[in-house]
Structures are given as structure tokens and as C-alpha cells.
Amino acid sequence: MRVRRIYLAFGVVLALAFATACHLTTANISSLKLGKDKDVTNEATTFGPNDKVYARAEVSNVPSKVTVKVRLILEKVEGQPENAPEPGSEKSFDFPQDGWMTYTLTPPPSGWPPGTYRVEARMFIENGEQKDQKSANFTVSRD
């Protein structure tokens, strides 16, 4: 009987040690919102041709450094191929711990062409493996 208690106690200690050594959750992009101000106090999905677009993402459960790469996709935009990434729009943000990032899109001098756009945020761990992805769509209408 005494040996059984020792094994049981050892099993409990081993299980607790294993549980604390392993992360029960993984790093993720917990939110991605679009708006017309840096803090995205009010979410928006429709913008005018000359509006700045702000994308704000929250990164959670970061056990070690992750990188979030954000880019603009032209889903269905006048005069552009469908679902094409906007050249030069990708930006990387490094996170050593949980945090927020803001991605700012400034309209071209002639304004955003009317259509549907997508902001895509992809999270990578240090070895380059993608761990999460979120996207948010917005439309630009003529004034």
C-alpha cells in the first residue's frame, strides 16, 4: 500500500511539472480591427478615397519572440488584378511579448480606387513557421 502512495505522489508531481513546463495556449493574433484613427476607437469597414486606414492588431500568449507580417491585398479593385498583394505594402512587427501594433495605410496621391481591399496579418515564430493569420476587409466607395 505504501509503494502505491509513493507512485501516486510521484505521478501527481510529474503531471504538475509537465503542465507548468508546457504552454497550454499558443501565440495568436487575438484581434484585428480597422478604423479611421490610430487607436481604432470606432471600427470601420467603409472608407473614402482620401481616408487613411488604420489596422490595429493584438498579439497574445507570446512565449518567445514572434513576428507579425501585415500586407494589403487588392481583392476587387478597379483596374487591378483580383486578390493581388499591393507591392511594397508588407510591414513586419516583432513581438518579444504580448502587445499591440498599428499598421497605417495612406492613400495614393490620386486616392484609393473604388473596390474591396483586405488587410492580412500573419504570425510567424522564430523558425519561420506560420502560427496564425487574421484578415479584415474594407471597401472604398466614390465620394
Image (spheres, helix red, strand yellow):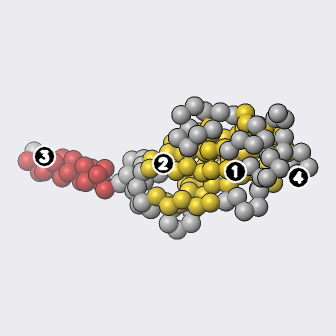
Check residue 31 in the rendering and tell me which mark sits there, or answer none. none
Check residue 81 in the rendering and tell me which mark sits there, or answer none. 4
Check residue 106 in the rendering and tell me which mark sits there, or answer none. 1
Neighbour tally class for label 1: few under 14, some 14-19, many 20 plus, Cα within 10 Å: few
Label 3 vs label 2: CA separation?
Answer: 48 Å
Q: Secondary structure at mark 1?
A: loop
Check residue 100 in the rendering and tell me which mark sits there, or answer none. 2
Residue at 60%, 51% (x, y): give it. 103
Residue named by callout 3: 5
Residue 6 vs residue 120, the one in the foreground: 120
Q: Amino acid at mark 3?
A: Arg
Q: Amino acid at mark 1?
A: Thr
**At which x and y percent is residue 75?**
80, 45
Tags 3 and 4 in contact by the CB under 8 Å rule?
Answer: no
Pointer 2 or 4: first along the chain: 4
Q: Secondary structure at mark 2?
A: strand
State which quadrant residue 43 falls in. top right
Tags 4 and 1 in contact by the CB under 8 Å rule?
Answer: no
Residue 87 vs residue 2, the one in the foreground: 87
Pointer 3 or 1: first along the chain: 3
Tags 2 and 4 in contact by the CB under 8 Å rule?
Answer: no
Label 3 vs label 1: CA separation?
Answer: 67 Å
